[in-house]
Amino acid sequence: MYCLPWRGHAFGMPNYRRDWTLGGTWFFTVNLLQRRDNDLLTENFDCLRDCIALERTRRPFSVIAWVVLPEHLHCIWRLPEGDADYATRWRRIKTDFSRRMSKTEYRSSIRRARGERGIWQRRYWEHAIRDEIDLRRHIDYIHFNPVKHGHVDAVRDWPFSSFHRYVRRGELPEDWAGP
C-alpha cells in the first residue's frame, strides 16, 4: 500500500531533518524516557562522564559546555574538521550508559520486542551553533539551567556543570547570574 507524505512523514516513518555540517558545533538536549521523579543522571554522574570520555577516545570531539540535571542534560560539542557524525556518538554514549545500569526500569511491550532499554528517549534535540553570539547564548543557557529548573538558587551551587571549569579558567565570575 502506498502512503502519501503527511506532516513530515512518508510511508509511516518519521522524516527527521538533521544538519550534517562537517566540523560543526552543536547544542544538544538529551532526555531520559521517564522524566518525573527521576534522578538517574545525577545519581550516576560519574558513569555518564565515563561513557562520554570513552566515546571521546573512540571518536574525538570537544565538550564546550555541559550541564547534567536529574533527568536530562544539555551540552555543546565541537566535532573535528570533516566529521559530522554526532548521531553515532550519542547512540554509543546512551548504549554504554544503559549497559552499566541495572535493569529495573519499566519497558513498554514495543521496547521489549525491540530489545531496547527504557532509560533514554529515542531521539534528542540538536541545534547547529551559528556564530559566537549563538554559542555564548547557549553556554549561558546551559549554565543557568539548574537555577531555571529550581534545583539551586545560584549557578555556582550546581556541581554537575562546566560552569566551574569556566570559573577556574577566569572566563566567568563565581557569582555569575546570581546572588
Image: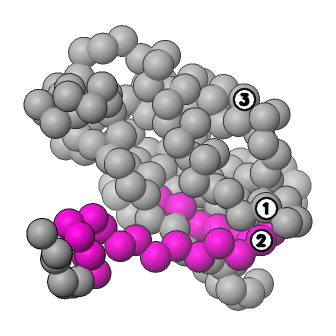
Mark nearer the N terminus (3 vs 2): 2
- What is the x, y in percent for residue 72? 40, 48
Q: Which residue is mark 3?
A: 54
How far apart, in angstroms, are the residues tagged by discs 3 and 2? Answer: 22 Å
Instruction: Name the element at disc 2.
Output: loop
The crowding category of the residue bearing disc 3, from other C-alpha atoms within 10 Å (few below 14, some 14 to 19, many at least 20), is some
Q: Amino acid at mark 1?
A: Asp
The crowding category of the residue bearing disc 1, from other C-alpha atoms within 10 Å (few below 14, some 14 to 19, many at least 20), is some
User: 175 or 3, which lies in front?
Assistant: 3
Q: Amino acid at mark 2?
A: Leu
Count numbered badges in the picture. 3
Residue at the location (18% across, 83% down)? 4
Mark nearer the N terminus (1 vs 3): 3
Instruction: Name the element at disc 3.
Output: helix
Residue at the location (79% across, 53% down)? 62
Residue 19 position by quadrant: bottom right
Identify the mark at residue 93; answer none if there is no mark.
none
- Look at the image and say whether residue 30 sits in the magenta stretch: no
The crowding category of the residue bearing disc 2, from other C-alpha atoms within 10 Å (few below 14, some 14 to 19, many at least 20), is some
Q: Which is closer to the viewer, label 3 or label 2? A: 2
Magenta range is 8-29
- Is residue 172 among what the camera can see? no
Specify whether 112 is left or right of 131.
left
Tell me, yes or no, whether the two marked residues, 1 and 2, touch with CB atoms within 8 Å. Answer: yes
Q: Which residue is mark 1?
A: 83
Identify the mark at residue 22; answer none if there is no mark.
2
Residue at the location (49% across, 16% down)? 100
